[in-house]
Image (cartoon, rainbow, N blue to C red):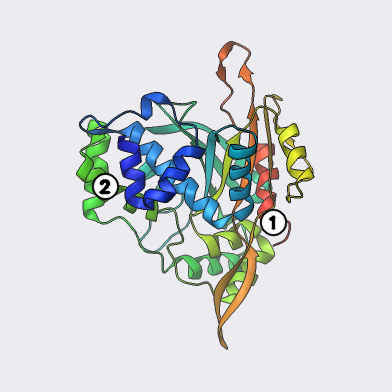
Amino acid sequence: MTSIFALVRACLGQHATNTLFSQMDIHPALNQASRGDISRAELAQALNMVLFHGLLERVPVGKDYVEGEVTQNHRKIVFDHGAVRTVRWPCGDLPQGEQAIIRILGPLGFTLAATYPLPKIKMTGRAYCHQDFPQDIAQFFVSELHPEQFSLAFQDGVTRVLASSKNPLNQEAMTTLMQLDQTGALPMQHALKALPKWVACFDRQHVNVALSDYELLLAESAEMAWIATEGNAFNHATDRVQDVQAAAQQQRQLGRPIKDKVEVSSSARVRQTAFVAERVEREMTSADGVVMRSVPGSFFELISRDVLQADQSSLDLAFDAGNATGIFGMTRAKA
């Protein structure tokens, strides 16, 4: 049994792990029999796979797509990147903004690759790429929303929503991250305890939002409204395909809800499109008690990357601010 399989199985169980390993392309160097301590690259791959599975459980059209690609097109999914939204604002017991996420990504071997200002939606996006397997371990696109650029009423609403945030990482978990940062590996028994805690950081950490606050936030920022109900959960996960135009057309023919436009980067080497975000029912509080509200959830994305002209063996792993802004619209259109 490989180290990654053992770690993922501890989180998801045997059946889900078997399915996931049959669906996802994994670099052979990462998928070897366990030999001593677990490397940061193996830990990063295990975390990514558990988060990918969680996204598919929340996004049925994504799950249908993955199953269809594996069974009908006889290929495995190449997990390109996952996206997480944060808020650069006081967050209760949780570190502000992207610090809540990169405190985990850093020890796992991810480093900042590029920063992408997103002024139209008053956010900043940052790409984190793995140092050891940059093309083979999925990147993280972590965005921060800037409430100070909105109205004072909006800022007050953000404060109320985030004030109850709890920190999933206790002192033991932080000590384990420090150990990983220093040594680049963990004993299996430590890794098995740590992985579920890391996974828990990719979720909503605050209590149910008040309906009045949700509507206040939605009036100025669909992105903040999304964070109010979904928190730091994976906003989307992405399959890297050879021809995103052809893949999108095939999905349209199958009747799946995919956006009409393919976003093309300024370099023309990166092309992206996405399925429409799932609608989910979320509890909110009101003067009349708990109410249910249908809101945009997470979604699944497709991307094509060309090789860099200066190095024909390396993919262009960059992102594009224009592309990102367009993709963010998948949770905005029906908000």
Eyeballing the image, is 279 above or below 292? above
Instruction: Return the residue at label 2.
Output: 192
Whether pointer 1 and pointer 2 mark residues with C-beta atoms closer than 8 Å, the reply is no
Disc nearest the viewer among 1 and 2:
2
> Is 158 placed left or right of 1 in the picture?
right
Instruction: Return the residue at label 1.
Output: 332
Seen at 40% across and 37% down, the residue is 45
Quadrant (top left, top right, bottom left, bottom right) of the C terminus? bottom right
Q: In what element is the residue under mark 1?
A: loop
Q: CA distance from mark 1 to mark 2?
A: 37 Å
**Residue 310 percent location from the top left of the image:** 60, 11
For badge 2, the amino acid type reads Leu
**Residue 294 percent location from the top left of the image:** 65, 69
Quadrant of res 169: bottom left
> Is 131 placed left or right of 277 in the picture?
left
166 and 64: which is toward the camera: 64
